[in-house]
């Protein structure tokens, strides 16, 4: 599962500050605790000392916030997530495939802005990971020779990696990834429902949420169905 949160540069600090404010209101004695959805939900690691009711209340408000927040100028963030059905892509490097898809979909989103007269260049900031070197090798190739989807035209640099503990925005991306994981792995639409309208969409097709599987023509998930109906369902279905 791979995810991203796309923001205008002027909106990065306001959104991060609003997430921090929510955390401090719920947990005033835990300044700087990292928003990490899986341990928040299950009560692992540093979240083990937080009562279940408080953990779940905070998680619920954070998702509602990500589903409704807009900047002072009226801009809303756009979300991206890729879920890969591994059996449908045997022989492929799943990490490479997922990164290729999410970068291409983000680039396509910015291309639409460009064609409408609102041009932007982008910078990708991601959580530190063991596959950092792989991605930093692949992105320059995708920018020059292209991927199987096409060239990346909007990125000004290879992805930059940070410790997620120090970035509320990277932590927000974790929430998007976890909601997507809950939906596709556990058939639980509760969390993705609150942010579903924020996945990048054009012409009724949910480009920002991708389910890569061989049965996409019949799959009833909200993303696959949008390609057939040209409508993003207001209620995320269980499939």
Image (cartoon, rainbow, N blue to C red):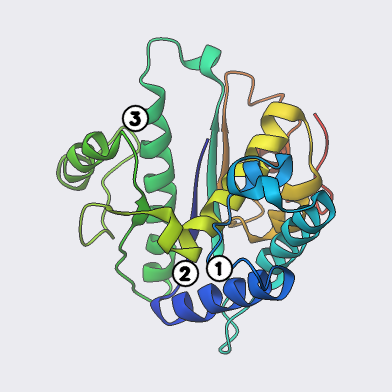
Give the numbered dot on residue 191: none
In this rendering, is residue 1 above or below 67? above
- Tell me the residue that label 2 is attached to: 7
Percent across and percent down for residue 175 are 61, 51
Distance between mark 3 and mark 1 Cα atoms: 25 Å
* Nearest to N terminus: mark 2 or mark 3: 2
Percent across and percent down for residue 208 are 55, 50
Q: Is residue 33 visible?
A: yes
Q: Secondary structure at mark 1?
A: loop
* Nearest to N terminus: mark 2 or mark 1: 2
**Residue plotted at (39% across, 77% down):** 9
In this rendering, is residue 185 above or below 13? above
Q: Secondary structure at mark 3?
A: helix
* Residue extending furthest toward the bottom: 72
Disc 2, disc 3: CB below 8 Å? no
Disc 3, disc 1: CB below 8 Å? no
- Tell me the residue that label 1 is attached to: 77
202 left or right of 189 in image: left
Disc 2, disc 1: CB below 8 Å? yes
* Nearest to N terminus: mark 3 or mark 1: 1
In this rendering, is residue 141 above or below 62? above
Percent across and percent down for residue 89 are 47, 16
- Tell me the residue that label 3 is attached to: 96
Q: Residues within 10 Å of mark 3 (few under 14, many from 20)?
A: few
Q: Nearer the viewer, residue 10 or 221?
A: 10
Distance between mark 2 and mark 3 Cα atoms: 24 Å
Q: Residues within 10 Å of mark 2 (few under 14, many from 20)?
A: some
């Amino acid at each position: 599962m791979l995810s991203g949160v796309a923001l205008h540069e002027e909106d990065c600090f306001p959104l991060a500050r609003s997430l921090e404010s929510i955390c401090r209101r719920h947990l005033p004695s835990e300044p700087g605790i990292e928003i990490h959805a899986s341990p928040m939900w299950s009560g692992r690691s540093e979240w083990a000392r937080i009562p279940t009711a408080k953990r779940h209340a905070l998680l619920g408000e954070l998702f509602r916030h990500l589903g409704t927040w807009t900047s002072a100028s009226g801009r809303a963030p756009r979300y991206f997530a890729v879920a890969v059905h591994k059996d449908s892509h045997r022989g492929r490097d799943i990490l490479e495939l997922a990164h290729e898809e999410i970068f291409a979909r983000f680039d396509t989103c910015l291309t639409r802005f460009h064609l409408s007269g609102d041009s932007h260049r982008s910078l990708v900031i991601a959580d530190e990971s063991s596959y950092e070197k792989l991605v930093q090798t692949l992105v320059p190739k995708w920018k020059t020779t292209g991927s199987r989807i096409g060239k990346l035209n909007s990125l000004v640099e290879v992805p930059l990696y940070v410790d997620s503990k120090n970035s509320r925005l990277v932590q927000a991306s974790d929430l998007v990834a976890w909601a997507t994981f809950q939906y596709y792995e556990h058939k639980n639409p509760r969390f993705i429902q609150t942010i579903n309208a924020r996945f990048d969409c054009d012409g009724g097709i949910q480009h920002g949420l991708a389910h890569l599987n061989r049965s996409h023509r019949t799959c009833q998930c909200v993303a696959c169905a949008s390609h057939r109906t040209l409508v993003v369902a207001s209620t995320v279905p269980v499939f």
